[in-house]
Amino acid sequence: MPNHALLLRKYFQLLQWFTESEAAFLDVLHPEFMQVDYPNLIVATTRERNFRKLMEGVAAGRRMLANQYFHHRSLIETGDTVFAEYYWTGELKVKAGRLHRGHILKANICSIIQFKSGKIFRQSNYNCFEPLR
């Protein structure tokens, strides 16, 4: 049985470091990868992202954020599904609306991640951002 937790750590490291290498992501993501972000403070409507859109999001994150960190709280694994709870922070490196450069965004996140053929196949994100000040 594959070690899903190890694969997830690698995936979150790639995201945290704003890795733009498609090959690095293809090591952990299934070719038919799909991510769903449900509405939250940042995303007004449900958003689906395939591999290409994820890579565009990584590049956009690199332009917008000075850094980001994923602080894992818990992982619950059942078969080919992992429930991941973590705390995310991201520091703005540009002004964004009323938010100044250097502002720290914070969110409590729960992701349901499904695996297929030993790779991340589906990811559903439930992001709960702390109020903007």
Image: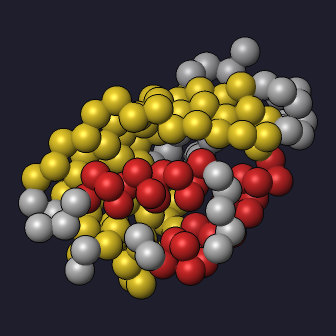
Q: Is residue 63 above or below residue 120?
A: above
In the rendered image, the residue lying farthest to the top is 133
Picture coordinates of residue 98 (x, y %)? Answer: 86, 28
In this rendering, the count of numbered labels is 0
Picture coordinates of residue 105 (x, y %)? Answer: 66, 29
Whether residue 124 appears in this view of the structure is: no
Depth order, front residue of 52/13: 13
Q: Which quadrant of the view contains residue 31?
A: bottom left
Is residue 93 left or right of 104 when viewed as pictured? right
Whether residue 15 appears in this view of the structure is: yes
Q: Which quadrant of the view contains residue 18?
A: bottom right
Q: Is residue 11 above or below residue 87?
A: below
Is residue 78 left or right of 129 when viewed as pictured? left
Picture coordinates of residue 7 (x, y %)? Answer: 35, 60
Depth order, front residue of 17/126: 17
Q: Residue at x 34, y 68 (%)?
A: 120
Q: Residue at x 83, y 27 (%)?
A: 102
Which quarter of the image is occupied by the C terminus? top right
Colour option used: secondary structure
Picture coordinates of residue 50 (x, y %)? Answer: 50, 74
Q: Is residue 118 above or below residue 8?
A: below
Q: Residue at x 56, y 22 (%)?
A: 130
Q: Residue at x 49, y 65 (%)?
A: 48
Q: Is residue 132 above or below residue 97?
A: above
In the rendered image, the residue lying farthest to the bottom is 31
